[in-house]
Amino acid sequence: MNKAGKKEKFYTPKSDKKFQEHERTILVGVFLPGEEEEEAMEELGRLAESAKANVVGTLIQHKDRLQPGTLLGKGKVAQLQEMAIGKNASLVIFNNDLKPMQERNLSKMLNRRVISRHALILDIFAQRARTKEGKIQVELAQLEYTLPRLAGLGIALSRLGGGIGTRGPGETMLETDRRHVLRRISKLRDELDKLEKHRNLLRRGRKERGYMIAALIGYTNAGKSTLLNSLTASGVLAEDMLFATLDPTTRKLMLPGNKEILLVDTVGLIRNLPHELVAAFHATLEELMDADILIHVMDSSHPRVREQVEVVHNVLKDLKSDNKPVLPVLNKVDLITPQRLDELLVDFPDAVVMSATKKIGKDEFLETLEDMRDALKRYVQPGPENDMYVYDNSGKFIPNKIQKESMGNFQAG
């Protein structure tokens, strides 16, 4: 309940029969003073939906400090238990990051499975991974997250069953001992190292064949995959859900001047992305670091698009890719009013206005991308072993390596 005594509702569950048949779930958020709850709970609901949960209830508590053992106060735990029984819910998902002890305490008190937003995102990634590399990355992230939670986890799973938060490539390791898990983690890291070397060879090959690269980046569900499909007819899965696609996809794109560029679709970003996933998907995110141009796709219909843009900018800073040329795209303009568009163009005056589904703004996008490509007349980019790679005036890659010390104060232009 809020201060006015009205029931708080930040996420509207889907009512169709398909979702009614999924795991009945209650969402919980505990917020300290000054923390934004509406956005957090709405996004948690979308994540739960992406994991095929049937959200039947929401519980929120505001506290000056978190309870170390349960996050919630005793009264709220009792209220949550009553709600779970009344709603016949088998799963409780907390928006907060839960420590292993807190998960065990809450699961025991509620006699239900309890997971965090962190574990929920891992579960979604486990469902979405399709390639060998993607599956290895997800399993590694799952096992590193699970390792400190092994004590008592097997008992909890045997009593409460599987489901959301226990699926994916790493689920068969949950009830084994720490030594086996550690050995598996070591093996997965070795496999990832080999795949990363192979990916680096592919990147280098693309450069040596003269291709320039544009990477699609953006908050999850901003429409990157839909845009890729619209431009290249690639057939990549594109649905209205968070993390609909996970594995990176590369396609050739023909620009108006009969020039080619490689278009790379990368994994969608989200606030507070679990650090295990950031580490495991480092090689995939390196596609951004290797790109010549970043195409930042923004969901103009989202009420907090500015906050989403800030999340993307922060990730680019972490990857040291925030100095690359960026083509901003305001996508989904068919879903907003002209007044809303005018407001956004004040904040993003250089953005191309588009609707990937309606193919609005496609010609302007292609022309702008071609102009950016041509503007990189002698764009210098670091390569393996600190060599420098150079493009000629047409954007064609010059294979000869030029050592750093001979470049002086060379500038793009």
Image (tube, rainbow, N blue to C red):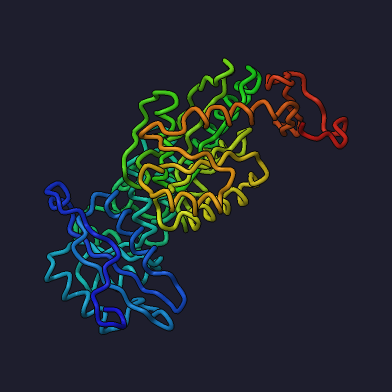
Q: How far across and down, in percent of the image, does residue 90 sit?
A: 18, 62
37 and 138: which is toward the camera: 37
Vertical relation: 307 (above or below) 403: below
| Residue located at (85% from left, 31% from top) | 407
| Snapshot quadrant of residue 95 | bottom left
| Residue located at (45% from left, 41% from top) | 267
67 and 346: which is toward the camera: 346
350 and 412: which is toward the camera: 350
Residue 183 in sight from this viewpoint: no
Q: How far across and down, in percent of the image, does residue 392 sit?
A: 74, 21
Which quarter of the image is occupied by the C terminus? top right
| Residue located at (52% from left, 28% from top) | 263
Which quarter of the image is occupied by the N terminus? bottom left
| Residue located at (44% from left, 24% from top) | 232
Residue 41 in sight from this viewpoint: yes
Q: How far across and down, in percent of the image, does residue 98 sit?
A: 38, 67
Report whether 181 appears left or right of 114: right
